[in-house]
Amino acid sequence: MNAYENLEVWWITGAQLLYGGDAVVAVDAHSKEMVDGLNASGELPVKIVYKGTANSSKEVEELMRAATVSDSCVGVITWMHTFSPAKMWIHGLQQLRKPLLHLHTQYNAEIPWDTMDMDFMNLNQSAHGDREFGHICARMHVRRKVVVGHWTNPETRRRIAVWQRVAAAWADAQDMRVIRFGDQMNNVAVTDGDKVAAEMQLGYHVDYCPVSELMEYWKKVDEKRVDELFAEYLSLYDYEPEIAQPGTEKNTAVRNAARAELAIRDCLADKGAKAFTTNFDDLGTDDINDPKFVGFDQIPGLASQRLMAEGIGFGAEGDWKSAALYRTVWYMTRGLEGGCSFLEDYTLNFDGNRSSILQAHMLEVCPLIAEQKPRLEVHFLGIGIRKAQTARLVFTSRPGDGITATVIDMGNRFRLIVNDVECIKSKPLPKLPVASALWIPKPDFETGAAAWILAGGTHHSCFSYALTAEYWEDYAEMAGIEMVRIDADTTIAAFRRELRYNEVYYLLNQ
Ligand code: MN
């Protein structure tokens, strides 16, 4: 099933009545043919719904208002078949609160040199009509994507498809609740930020849930469900033999991890949350030897790994910005090859001109990026309030190109930082059994890491094999936030200038 089946993108063709009713009838027929062709191509993840021609200010306004309040419409595509005087778009554009894609295309591909007459020209005017529309968008600072290309061209469709995925994820984020189990890790700056500004700018809502409330779910988890989930683990993953032996320490740890997963699932379901954070310093009643102890016996890392694989956003140490961003990454990439994960810059590997960064976390790496079947293991983890035998999925990630992203709060704006990376073969860590990836940031380790640090990027980021910078450009445009990209062409001198120019831009535009 198409993951975006219930969503729509609306197509509005700009025209006017200057050239008579016949012209509009032809415009309408052409538009239908184009929309049908795009939908039939199988290259667009979200179906396009043709909403007719807009021939007056009133008609534009009605359509834009309807798009804004529609639950299924995630964005609007406009195209000016004839010259559509752009003053008639002003009121409609003022009311449009959905992502906009301006498609600069034409019904016919080549000029019909031998037959072209004035009737043809009165009908096929996108060359100048789309410029008139572009002008009013620029004048009004309407955020949009401009795609140029013939509608039958696969590259045009690919770019529309990218925007559709981002628009779908954007709609998803407007209805996202992030639950923080515990607060931020104390004193950490980069993962914190303004939750009010985030809701205004990025759409999602961030709530706090005391771990004591989560423990009420923990207490209610039925033993039979634990049995079932435990059996599911053994069917899905390779595992250490001791785990399967009842009564052993590792068996108990995995069963408790299953119970934690069920408690978190139940709590998130009750709250209608799509993302969550944990904090290794806040796992329930402090003293595990207290007879009244209620709490996780271990950090619920296995649960975080498995929930991420289902698209539930996750951020460690209270990192709600990463939790929300991970959900968006997962949503944008639904049905695409390649996985995604929350990752942390763990440790550096200096290796001449192939220096790289190990990406891991103490537990929480998503198995969607695994190269081999994940192995369920239990090891002692000596961090945080609960130093204990802790279950986790262990694997290394696939080599290949990808992109990683983070959002930071600069005080007067959010900054999205993206970096193209090359994942290279990682090695097992027998003494540090955690899931990991190993990558070289573009354009090279030294420049990529320096640019990321100059931009103020987090040690946490959301990685994907399937996304490209184009997705993030579309996302930043929809959100109206700053984006800086670190890629094969980045130089530190130019990147520094960009950061400085952006400071001025955002000072002038707050
Ligand atoms: Mn971390």
Image: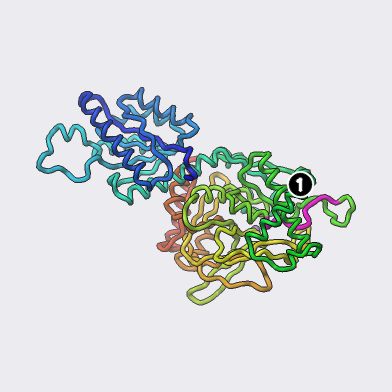
- Residues 136 and 129: in front is 129
Provide the residue designation for mark 1: 221
Please give the name of the residue rendered at 63% of the width and 56% of the height, measured from the top-left corner: 305
314 lies left or right of 220: left
Q: Which residues are magenta?
A: 293-302
162 lies left or right of 129: right
Please give the name of the residue rendered at 11% of the width and 39% of the height, measured from the top-left corner: 115
Q: Position of residue 36 (x, y in %)?
A: 33, 38
Q: Is residue 496 above or below residue 51?
A: below
Q: Residue furthest bottom?
A: 352
Q: Position of residue 232 (x, y in %)?
A: 66, 56
Q: Position of residue 410 (x, y in %)?
A: 56, 49
Q: Is residue 381 among the parts visible in the rendering? A: no
Of the four image quadrants, the one with ligand 1 is bottom right
Q: Is residue 89 above or below residue 302?
A: above
Please give the name of the residue rendered at 61% of the width and 72% of the height, measured from the top-left corner: 428
Kind of residue indicated by mark 1: Val
Is 136 included in the stretch rendered in magenta? no
